[in-house]
Structures are given as structure tokens and as C-alpha cells.
Amino acid sequence: MFELSTLYAAFERYFGHPPTRIARAPGRVNLIGEHTDYNDGFVFPMALDRATYVAARPRADRIVRVFSVKFREEDQFNLDQIVRDEQRQWVNYIRGVAKGLLARDLPLRGADLLIDSDVPAGSGLSSSAALEVAVGYTFQLLNNINLLGEELALLAQGAEHSFVGVKCGIMDQLIAALGEAGHALLIDCRDLSYRPVPIPAHVRVVVCDSGVRHRLAGSEYNQRRAGCEEAVRLLKPVLGKIQALRDVRLTDLAEYGHLLPPDLLPLARHVVSENERTLAAADALAAGDVVKMGQLMVESHHSLRDDYRVSVPELDTLVELALAAPGCYGSRMTGGGFGGSTVSLVAADRVDEFVAAMIAGYAIRTGRTMQPLVCTAGAGVSCVYASEEE
């Protein structure tokens, strides 16, 4: 459990005075609906009970000082001249959010920020979006700015696009801003509407980190997105006013898939089928049909592995082990891929056996040590401490 008192004391020790605000934004795990968000499609994530925390205090000048507990590094920049740091990626998430707020003509003053997190980085649990949303919300609190959750999510996404260089979809930032405790959210990434779906009490969501680290700013992720956009361009002449792969059906691909090059057809097939699976999965979970939900998760993994080609052997191994372990209804890779984690739906009364089997099996198969996370659906961004000074 993350201790706020420890964060408070670290801020006071580092900056020489106490924080006036502490905000948190959660990581997330996506139950199903992968690489659909930037195709205007459907996703089905839940916010985690693990989060990124920002302790903060306003300054009288235009300087922002940041200390990362995890990296043991400081950053400092002036709000009047925010430039990208080519050496340290983590600072660009913070700078990009500040620049995005200023681009909206919102009044900002300098601040001291101390950041810590218990969201594992690089494991597909969206530590980056948690950081962006937590920092954005902190600036809101310090400057009395009122943004809706959807606006904050779009601001954070814009920072990742323009300042970090990852053309991510909106899912990660949206669930960090709008997550509901005890629920997953079925999100329509076209209009940002969403429907909370309760997680049945008799199941647990278990995340297993492969230990393989990815870097989404690398070319593979952006290549997949460009491929999807090219598929839409090639299908438009025969399908009419389609804006994204969200508007394409499997029957359309059966009829016109020959118009797509061999490397693009599987990408389109994954996105189109994944949208259908995601809608079916939300309905299944809402009805308490965890068997159906599990089947759809497995189908999703196979599609990500074979058609979208973003899995790696370690993720495939984790899914195989999960499906053979006690109490597992379904399992799949989660996140952008090329490493990261799997997510499994497990019977609550078998979760200890499941965890033990995963640890032992992964060690035997890969030689890697792995500690599964049994996750609870948490709430979205919030202020968890406010001093009486303000």
C-alpha cells in the first residue's frame, strides 16, 4: 500500500517546505479491446488500485521544479520556454502537459512537484498516462482550473502525441481520468461516451508482467497506426464515407479485403474483429457470463499474436500457462504489446492456486521470476490531500 505520509515527508525533505496538494491518477489494465482506440473503436479497461502520485506546492515565479523518486532525478523548466528534453523521456510527459495547458490560454504559475508511483513502468499498465493525468490534475488544483475529465484526458493525450512522440489512442488517459471503483468502463473512443460495467464479485483480475520491456515511442507502434490509416484510405472508394476501421465490418473485409496489401489485411482484420469482441465482452460481463468473457479474451490474444503481430514469446507463454492454471476463465496480452503484461480472469476462490502455478510455471519455462498482481478496479484521478494553507 502506498503511504501518503512517506510522500509528504519526502517532499518536505527535498523542497524544504510541505506540499499543499497531493493528487493521484491510476494505472489501468485493459480487459479487452487492444489497438482499437486510435481506430475510433471500443475499449474495455478498468482503473487499477495502483497509481502515480504528485505532491505539489505552488511557487511565486514561473519555474517548475520536479523530482522523480523513481528516477532519483530532478527536472527544472520555465513556463515561458518549454522545450523537449532529448535525453530524458520521463520529463517530457510533464513538460508536455504544462505546455498543453498554456496552449489553452489557461493561467499557470510555477510549482514544486515530487512524483512517485506504484504502477510498474513498461509493463503495459499505462504508467505514462497515469503520470500525465496526475500532473495535469495537479496543475488544475494549484491554479483553480476546472476541466472536465474528458478534457483532461484529451489534454494528456495531446501531450503524448506532440511532445513525447507516441501517437497513442485516448483509452489510457480517459480511464485514468474517469475510472470507477469496482467497474470496468466500456468506452467509445469516437465520442468518448462510456458505460460502467461491474466486475462480478466472484472473479479476480490478475496481471502477470512478462519482464520484457517495451518502448512505444519506437517505430513498431506508430507503424501499426499508419497501416490502419492506409487500410481506411484503400477501402474508402468501395465503402463510402468511412472515417476509421471502426466503420468497417468483417463482411466488408470478406468482400473487399483483396484491395489491401498482404501486410495490411491482417491489421484491419484484427481491429474490426476486436471491436466486435469488445462489445460482446462488455455484454457478457454485465450479464455475469465470465465463461464467455474468458473465451473472448483468448480470441483477442490469438488475433493480437497472429494478425496484429504485437505479442512476444514470453506473453504467449504466460497465456498458455494461465489457461492451464486453476480457476482461469481467460487470458490475453494487454497494452500496446512488444512486451509488458497479460491479464487473466480468475475465479476468486482459486486465485491463490492460480498465482502459485503462474510463478512456478514461468520460472520453469523462461527462468524469469514473476510476481502476479491481483488487481482491484480503482477510481479515477483525485485529490487525496489538501492543506489548510489554500
Image (cartoon, rainbow, N blue to C red):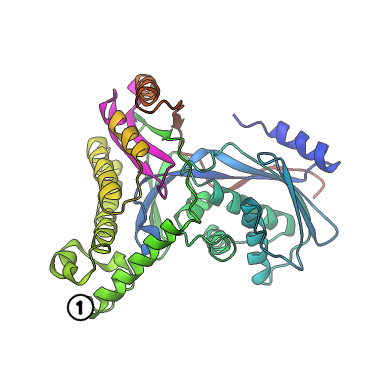
Q: For this rendering, which residue is in front, 326 or 201?
A: 326
Residue 210 location in percent, x, y? 42, 35
Amino acid identity at mark 1: Val
- The residue positioned 14% from the left and 64% from the top of the image is 254
Q: Which quarter of the image is occupied by the N terminus? A: top right
The residue carrying pointer 1 sits among few (fewer than 14), some (14 to 19) or many (20 or more) residues within 10 Å by Cα, namely few
Whether 67 is drawn above or below 247: the answer is above
Residue 110 location in percent, x, y? 79, 58
Residue 136 location in percent, x, y? 63, 56
Q: Does residue 189 appear anywhere in the picture?
A: no
Q: For this rendering, which residue is in front, 294 or 313?
A: 313
- The residue positioned 81% from the left and 40% from the top of the image is 14
Q: Left or right of 382: which side holds 19?
A: right
Q: Left or right of 140: which side holds 286?
A: left
- The residue positioned 66% from the left and 31% from the top of the image is 3
Badge 1 element: helix
Circle 1 is placed at which residue position? Answer: 238
Q: Does residue 263 appear anywhere in the picture?
A: yes
Q: Tell me which segment is drawn in magenta.
A: 322-350
Magenta stretch encompasses residue 331: yes
Q: For this rendering, which residue is in front, 384 or 358?
A: 358
